[in-house]
Image (cartoon, rainbow, N blue to C red):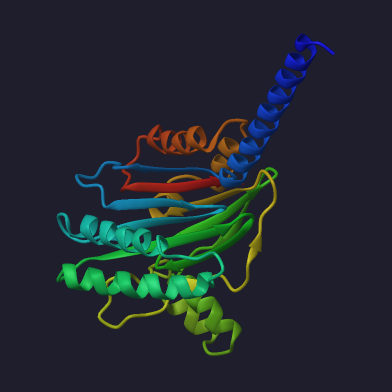
Amino acid sequence: MGTAFWADVICITIAFGILIMRICIKITEEKKRIFDAEAVLDIGKRQIQANAYGLKRMNTGMMAILTAGEGRDYVGKVAALTTVRTFTKLYNQYDSTQSPDNFFEKAFKLANTNVLNTLETGKAYAGCLILNRNILKYGIVGHMNVYVFRGKELILLSRGQIMEELIKEKVNKGLLSKEAALRISDINRAYNFVGRDDYMSPLVSSSEIKLKKKDIVVMITESVQNSISVREIEEVLVKKNGCKEKAREIIEVIKNKDEETANLGLILIGI
């Protein structure tokens, strides 16, 4: 066998090795990039954007935090940003073998302390999602809506800590009569928030939620919930484009209604 033969063998071996290496790199990248995540904020017709978000990836997992601040002038904005910074900083130390429930309790409690130390007044509602591959857990303080879009249907997971949900729970446990529940007004008001003098624990999903391929996790603020119907959101999510385009289109649908809107905020995470 001549020199040309062995040169060909070496070239083929190198080419095959490069191909295998590229396949391995692609598989590794796909494992790390299993989420198509996008967050969008819009100021609406307000003077100040008091919503904030954070998206943080780690190996095969990620954390998403969405906050809606309340307070005069820039107080709500500071409360929202302080909460987001607290969560993203803590997630840098997070280990996927740890319990998400422990992370939620620690993060919400520290965020509450940080907001109180930063502001005399002001508060924020917040929702946090933690995903490890296809497993979802969420924690909510106040009014935040979490859904899973599967197939062509938007499935509600939680409306957060609002009076209506608290009343339902008490009625179901026999702690409150239906007649008393009907007499309570303003039932959609949130009863918990970040920035309380007397810290109250978040609402945490009772069990892990196993997601399927092509599911989209949706988290929206109260202002988005009040400005667009479930059907309208479904009509956008069913389209064959990425979460970036879907999220922006949902905001545009709301803005095209030309109604008086507050700050808008949403996060979409495609599996």
Horizontal side of 68 relative to 71 (left or right) equals right
Residue appearing at x 54%, y 86% in the figure: 177
- Residue 187's quadrant in the figure? bottom left
Relative to residue 109, is residue 19 depicted above or below? above
- Picture coordinates of residue 268, whole percent (x, y): 51, 46
Residue appearing at x 40%, y 35% in the figure: 257
- Residue furthest right in the image: 1
Residue appearing at x 68%, y 24% in the figure: 14
Relative to residue 270, is residue 186 depicted above or below? below
Horizontal side of 92 relative to 30 (left or right) equals left
- Picture coordinates of residue 189, whole percent (x, y): 38, 68
Residue sitting nearer the eye, 147 or 257: 147
Residue 202 appears anywhere in the view: no
Horizontal side of 17 relative to 107 (left or right) equals right
Relative to residue 133, is residue 248 depicted above or below? above
- Picture coordinates of residue 26, whole percent (x, y): 63, 35
